[in-house]
Image (cartoon, rainbow, N blue to C red):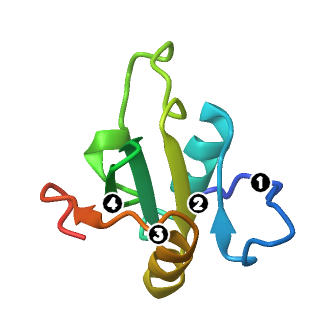
Amino acid sequence: MRRRFDLKVRRKMSEPSNIFIPTTRDEFEKWIYNHPDGYVINRKSRYDAMIHFGHCGHFKHSDQSASLTDNLKVCSTSLEDLESHWLDKYAIRLKRCKDCKT
């Protein structure tokens, strides 16, 4: 049986309650641990963003010094809400991860 981590969700008042934007590696790792079937948008640059499942191998780093939050991450358990929020706020077309097949 998996143990769920406590996670305090910090968000701006204008963001929907099911949108989570982690600011630290620990917050992000806890979110994907608790929501492996959730969705994560990783923005690599101003015009390059990709959507992944929480369990995607792209987020598995054994090097603890590697930053998982240098790039903006936006997370949600709802694909529809996440995509809608992303397009409203950032207006960047999303690519789909070919490895985790989102």
**Do labels 2 and 1 touch, CB within 8 Å?**
yes
Residue 1 visible in the picture = no
Q: Quadrant of residue 8?
A: bottom right
Q: Which mark is residue 41?
A: none
Label 1 sits on what residue type? Leu
Q: Tell me the residue that label 4 is attached to.
A: 52
Q: Secondary structure at mark 4?
A: strand
Residues at marks 3 and 2, CA–CA distance in whole angstroms? 9 Å
Q: Residue at x 41, y 47 (%)?
A: 43
Label 2 sits on what residue type? Asn
Q: Secondary structure at mark 1?
A: loop
Q: Quadrant of residue 9?
A: bottom right
Q: Tell me the residue that label 3 is attached to.
A: 38
Tag in front: 1 or 4: 4
Residues at marks 2 and 4, CA–CA distance in whole angstroms? 15 Å
Q: Residue at x 34, y 62 (%)?
A: 51
Please identify the residue farthest to the bottom as the structure is shown. 80
Query: Please, is residue 4 above or below residue 72 in the view?
Result: below
Residues at marks 4 and 3, CA–CA distance in whole angstroms? 9 Å
In the figure, is residue 62 to the left or right of 16?
Answer: left
Structural crowding at the residue carrying mark 2, measured as other residues with C-alpha within 10 Å and reported as few (<14), some (14–19) or many (≥20): some
Structural crowding at the residue carrying mark 4, measured as other residues with C-alpha within 10 Å and reported as few (<14), some (14–19) or many (≥20): many
Label 4 sits on what residue type? His
- First in residue order: circle 2 vs circle 4: 2
**Do labels 1 and 4 touch, CB within 8 Å?**
no
Q: Residue at x 41, y 44 (%)?
A: 46
Q: Disc count in the image?
A: 4
Q: Which mark is residue 34?
A: 2
